[in-house]
Image (cartoon, rainbow, N blue to C red):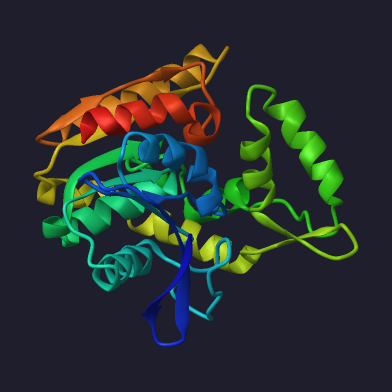
Amino acid sequence: MDLRVPVANGVTLRVRRHEGERAPAFLLVHGLASNALLWDEVAAALTAAGHPSFAVDLRGHGESDLPESGFDTATAASDLAAVATALELRDLVVAGQSWGGNVAVRFAAEHPALVSALALVDGGWIDLASQFDSWEACARALRPPDVDGLRGTDLRAHLRRAHPDWSPAAIEATAANLREEPDGTVTRRLPIPRHMEIVRSMFDDPPQRFYPALSMPVLLLPALPAGQPERAAQARARVRAAAGALSTASIKEYPDSDHDLHAQHPKRLADDLLALA
């Protein structure tokens, strides 16, 4: 069931509610330029175990509103708090992927009464300022490509080639990061200037300063790339540094995996979330 939840004046977010009667409920947060549909297969497994879940389209993403401002980690965390308040959610297990992990860290730090446990899915430790010599270098490297006008059929074919082990549902959910027009071409839901505002927020405001406020259990779930031992070693080092700065952290590695663990390994990820709960 899709809900429309107001979070600020003139701004409503889509929240995909998946039913369940058992506590705790799960709050599922996507990454930059992604959308809540990527969580559907994880949510189905959580529902099969009896737990409800709420997957949020952050502002400017998916079917949520695209206002003129608020494209930063702080506002995204505030929006999550507004969603939890509106839906009367407490004692949540919060799972955030990529930038969504950074958002989840800040949300949990600022609203600890709402969060019973935190799962960081290949994110939540992203510190761009430590990876680039300057904002200019970061912006050049992370500016997304111009894809407006690409045909949707070509996009899906590319996704299937790049991710042959993903389900058809995961491919369609990823394609939904872009809006398909009546002529079959796609356009960005999140415009590049808004995208780069979020990247700048990630550069200026890494999540590590919020770690001391996290007293709940935290599970770090890093994706280690296949066939790239140096990159995998760097990723492992960053994750271990993050875990060392957290008082109640554990690590569950996903070797030879994609950044979008919720798309590639939804059942395995759901099992790890259930074990955390």
**Residue 180 in the image, given as x and y percentages of width and height:** 77, 59
Q: In terms of image quadrants, where is residue 243?
A: top left
Is 1 drawn above or below residue 276 in the view shown?
A: below
Which quarter of the image is occupied by the C terminus?
A: top left
Residue appearing at x 86%, y 65% in the figure: 182
Q: Indicate the position of residue 79 as horizontal and vertical percent values.
A: 35, 69
| Closest to the observer, 203 or 94 | 94
Q: Is residue 277 visible?
A: yes
Which residue occupies 21% across, 46% down? 24
Instruction: Give 93 or 123, whichever is nearer the viewer.
Output: 93
**Residue 112 placement, left or right of 230:** left
Tell me what residue is drawn at x 31 percent, y 27 percent. Answer: 272
Q: In percent of the image, x 63 and y 28: which residue is there?
A: 166
Count of number-bearing discs: 0
Relative vertical location of residue 9 with respect to residue 134 in this rendering, above or below: below
Q: Is residue 158 left or right of residue 224?
A: right
Q: Is residue 238 visible?
A: no
Where does residue 53 sit, x and y in percent of width and height?
35, 49
Q: Quadrant of residue 195?
A: bottom right
Judged from this view, the residue extending furthest toward the bottom is 9
Whole-percent x, y for residue 135 in the image: 49, 55
Q: Residue furthest right?
A: 183
Going by the image, does 77 lie left or right of 277?
A: right
Q: Nearer the viewer, residue 129 or 175?
A: 175
